[in-house]
Amino acid sequence: NKGIVLLTDVYGFQSEETRAAADRIAGSCEAHVIVPDLFRGSPWPSSKTPCGAEYESWRISFPLGQLGGEVMGAAQYLNAAHGVELFGVLGFCFGGGRALELIAGQWVPAHAAAVFYPTRYDVGAIGAQIDVPLVCIFGGEDHIPGATAQDAEVLRRVLGKNPRMQHQ
């Protein structure tokens, strides 16, 4: 039985796009997908652009340990409720960057991970630590730190030096 914990962008689990993505992923992967409330009811407002001092203050109010606890709780639920034994992490934007950090720090027992436009992660700190199959998707014209084409190339190079990773 397979399960995926989907880590959202800053707009949280209640956005229509996130729910639609979770449904599509569940169907195409034939897996249970759970989308935890990473922001505990306080996602970034969709009316505001996620940048500037106010955003950075909000963003750092969700430490990695707290997010790791949310992901572990979701994984434990999937196991208890649905017998999930193969567990993956998937993240979009903010959630993509946190997924990279969580699997690198072995905060979560993931068997695989996929990230789309991951943002604001320290590639030097994570690249040598990742040891699960990983798919990274980057946009060609993203300007958010971590998600640029240049960031994609740096991550590819760093992962290429990791003896536990095979990259393409």
Image: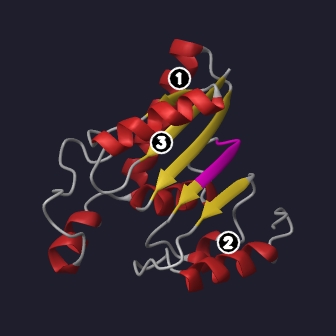
Crowd rating for badge 1 (residues with CA inside 10 Å; few <14, some 14–19, many 20+): many
Is residue 156 something one can see in this rendering?
yes
Q: Position of residue 138 (x, y in %)?
A: 56, 69
The amino acid type, in three-letter code, at marker 2 is Gly
Is residue 108 something one can see in this rendering?
no
> Which residue is identified by label 3?
6
Distance from disc 2 to disc 3, alpha carbons, whole Å, reads 21 Å
Label 1: which secondary element: helix
Distance from disc 3 to disc 1, alpha carbons, whole Å, reads 12 Å
Q: Nearer the viewer, residue 142 or 114?
A: 142
**Over which residues does the magenta segment extend?**
110-114
Q: Position of residue 130 (x, y in %)?
A: 70, 61
The total number of labels drawn is 3
Up/down of 62 relative to 33, above or below: below
Up/down of 70 relative to 158, above or below: above
Instruction: Kindly identify the residue that appears in the image at 54 percent across and 47 percent down.
Output: 90
